[in-house]
Amino acid sequence: MQILLFGIALPVIFGVAFSVWRVTRSREFGFGSFFGVAIASVLFISAISEDSLQNFTTLNRWLWFPCSILICGFITGIGDLFSRSFGARVLISCSSVILGVLFINIPGWENVTSRLLLGVATAVCSTLLFVVVRRRNCFSTIISLCFALIAPSVLAMLSGFAKLAIPIGAASCCLGFVSLVRLATQSNAPLNECVGFSGAVVIACIAALGAATGWSYDTSDIPVAAWLLASIAPLGLWLGELPTIHSRPTLSAWARILGCVILAASSIVITVFVLGSSAPQIVE
């Protein structure tokens, strides 16, 4: 019960409330999306309810992950105040992601070069996700991203790392509730820009860096392919941008959802199959 309350319920309530407040005030203040700050805060609050920040640099080193996500969220959120061009936002995205990844000093990623390569790959994913989100910022996009984040959460749980699974699951849950709010208020102009620039960057980072963190702590021998599929699950949105699909709104919406579900489900199915086949057989 304590895990559900402090690890999921309270962070999600905070994230949804912050998101709704942000979008209803965005027109008055005239600034861009801070949705990424909301999702990053949900992840961070949930994570510190699972483990202490005291001595996290040496003991609870996995907490570098939510701290890095929070850094990316604030940098992209603040950067959105001063940038409107696509090029400037891409530059801010890449810089914040690479900077955030360099802070992830967790087992398996101690080498600076490997973290830099991870940062570049994550920056590419965040840019690709932002391209889709800026075109299709609607209910189907948010609910698709909700399904996408289920993959790294489930894989972390199957690997025995529940402390990582719960914060990512809380972020996914927050996206699900925000998508319902978006559906109920989609006629309201202030909600037209919901996920936005910072949201796309943070969600891409949660998927990629969450999978990287889970892989580094994995003791169940989950295939690398499963972690890779989980890390790129948000990019399933691109299925709705295929030439024969993108011009049909309804078909494109279902394709976005299906694309994320396929990638997320594939990573989970591979994991369950491998773990099931490697389990000891009971001889009667």
Image (spheres, rainbow, N blue to C red):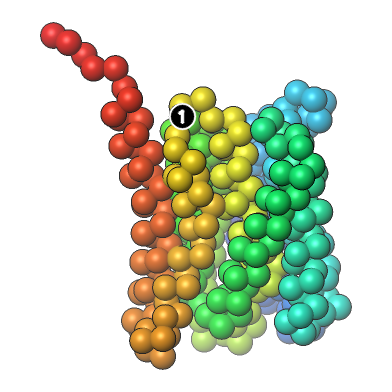
Along the viewing direction, whichever of 157 and 143 lies nearer the viewer: 157
Quadrant including the C terminus? top left
Number of marks: 1
Which residue is rendered at x = 36% and y = 59% of the image?
A: 262
Q: Is residue 68 above or below residue 74?
A: above
Question: What percent of the width, then of the height, locates residue 242?
Answer: 42, 81
Question: Residue lying furthest bottom in this view?
Answer: 247
Please state the horizontal and vertical placement of residue 255, each as a whole percent of the image.
Answer: 37, 74
Q: Does 137 sit left or right of 282 as displayed? A: right
**Relative height, residue 33 to residue 228 (above, below):** below
Is 36 left or right of 53, judged from the image as shown? left
Write down the quadrant of residue 8 in the picture.
top right
Residue shown at the point (76%, 75%) measured from the top left? 89
The residue positioned farthest toward the left in the image shown: 284
Residue 203 falls in image quadrant: bottom right
Q: Residue at x 76, y 80 (%)?
A: 87
Percent position of residue 86, x then y = 73, 82
Q: Which residue is mark 1?
A: 221
User: Given the image, on which type of amino acid does mark 1 rest?
Assistant: Asp
Viewer-side residue, 157 vs 1 = 157
